Image (cartoon, coloured by chain):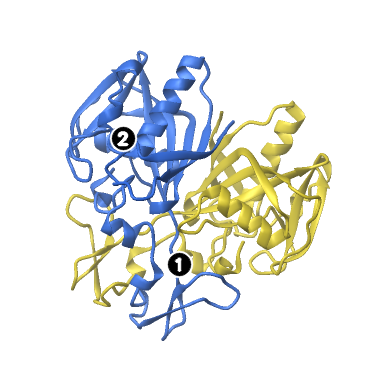
Chain colours: A blue, B yellow
């Protein structure tokens, strides 16, 4: 997660996520292009309330954000980073962060891995797409390998470490998306075949965002 | 493509895409939350120029948008829609459109198929993720099947039709993303095995957005 986005929290909702990621047209009060005040209406031919500029008529669309990251395999272990920033300070995550305009998902995943784990990686294959509708995020995780056997904590990590699959700290992971990704990976490795997984992570109503195990994995599809 | 987004053109750049999809922090002149004027600077700890509110300090992040759609198989044919809207009026496409906040990619793909082809579908498996960095879009296409053998043009389509693979109108498709998706699909069918594909569509410099064959497919990975 680049510091560029350490505010709009990947993987766990917060008030800033409600504005930035999960979207709420009613919180958009002004047009970002002309500065005019907005009205909140359903535009002609549409079905959802949008913020529409009362001066220039432009509509401010909001869409889900992609979080891209790498699951790095090395000597039958996987690389995790301990977060030195909020949210989920002190908990473990795969290197991942928001995809930027102008880059591809693989470029974003490689960049985030460099920023968080100072590791140069080659992306090998797509591993998972996990949608989290509640917070307007989609995780896209790639399998990758180290180009050189080197890694060290970047500015947002306090530690980077290789874990054998049986030693993955499932109770100290930063986000539900990481629990799901690493569980699917461990299952695939034990079954002897890595697949591509699609799924929807629905957080259980009334649970805390910090309860990373309070989710259901729905619509799980594999290729 | 829902009318909600028929402006910010999926698959072919235009001036509106430059603002809405491909992103340009310098075009964001006002804060959409407080209305304050923005400055354009690289925030502390970041690397890209962002629009930052000079009153409330909020940063306006821009991220790529996901376009979700269905490749519907029926009796060894695939369902295409002829576009009754710009861009690419009169050309053929898979039913697809921008993913909305609050829905999953599969829900979005099912919704767009209902809107454009009046078809009820079941999603079977993920088929492709295709990034188009130039216009800040990522296509996510699912294989699907008709729940009932019924389809008809929605308000944005003039015709919906099943095509045998050898009859797909590759020269009359609406977007490069559709050329790539349908080529990969035809290859997989001929090889007897459907895979999941990841790739980056880079438009050839200096070519027109309407030249749907002026691209390279880079970083093609399969699962």
Q: Which residue is nearer to you in this view: A92 or A114?
A: A92
Decide which of A151, B128 is in the foreground and name it. B128
Image position of A76 (left or right of A45)? left
Q: Chain of mark 1?
A: A
Q: How many marks?
A: 2
- Please name whichever residue, B170 or B99, is drawn nearer the observer in this view of the structure: B99
| Residue beneath disc 2 | A95
Residue under label 1: A61
Which residue is pictured at 64% across the width and 60% down the height?
B210
Q: CA distance from mark 1 to mark 2?
A: 29 Å
Residue that protrudes farthest toward the bottom in the picture = A55
Left/right of residue B4 with respect to residue B44 in the rendered view: right
Residue that protrudes farthest toward the front in the picture: A206
Q: Residue at x 57, y 59 (%)?
A: B10
Q: Nearer the viewer, residue A85 or B129?
A: A85
Q: Is residue B91 visible?
A: no
Q: Earlier in the sequence, mark 1 or mark 2?
A: 1
Q: Quadrant of residue B25?
A: bottom left
Q: Residue at horizontal 56%, vertical 70%?
A: A47
Residue B33 vertical placement versus A183 (above, below): below
Q: Quadrant of the N terminus of chain B?
A: bottom right
């Amino acid at each position: 997660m680049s510091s560029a986005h350490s505010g709009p929290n990947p993987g766990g909702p917060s008030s800033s996520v409600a504005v930035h990621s999960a979207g709420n047209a009613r919180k958009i009060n002004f047009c970002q292009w002309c500065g005019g005040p907005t009205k909140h209406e359903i535009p002609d031919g549409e079905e959802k309330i949008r913020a529409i500029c009362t001066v220039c008529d432009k509509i401010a669309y909001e869409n889900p954000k992609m979080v891209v990251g790498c699951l790095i395999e090395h000597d039958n272990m996987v690389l995790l980073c301990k977060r030195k920033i909020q949210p989920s300070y002190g908990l473990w995550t795969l290197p991942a962060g928001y995809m930027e305009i102008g880059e591809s998902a693989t470029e974003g995943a490689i960049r985030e891995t460099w920023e968080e784990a100072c590791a140069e990686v080659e992306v090998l294959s797509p591993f998972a797409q996990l949608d989290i509708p509640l917070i307007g995020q989609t995780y896209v995780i790639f399998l990758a390998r180290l180009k050189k056997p080197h890694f060290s904590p970047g500015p947002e990590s306090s530690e980077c470490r290789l874990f054998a699959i049986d030693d993955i700290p499932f109770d100290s992971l930063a986000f539900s998306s990481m629990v799901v990704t690493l569980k699917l990976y461990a299952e695939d490795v034990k079954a002897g075949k890595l697949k591509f997984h699609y799924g929807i992570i629905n957080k259980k109503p009334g649970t805390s965002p910090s309860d990373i195990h309070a989710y259901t994995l729905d619509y799980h599809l594999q290729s």
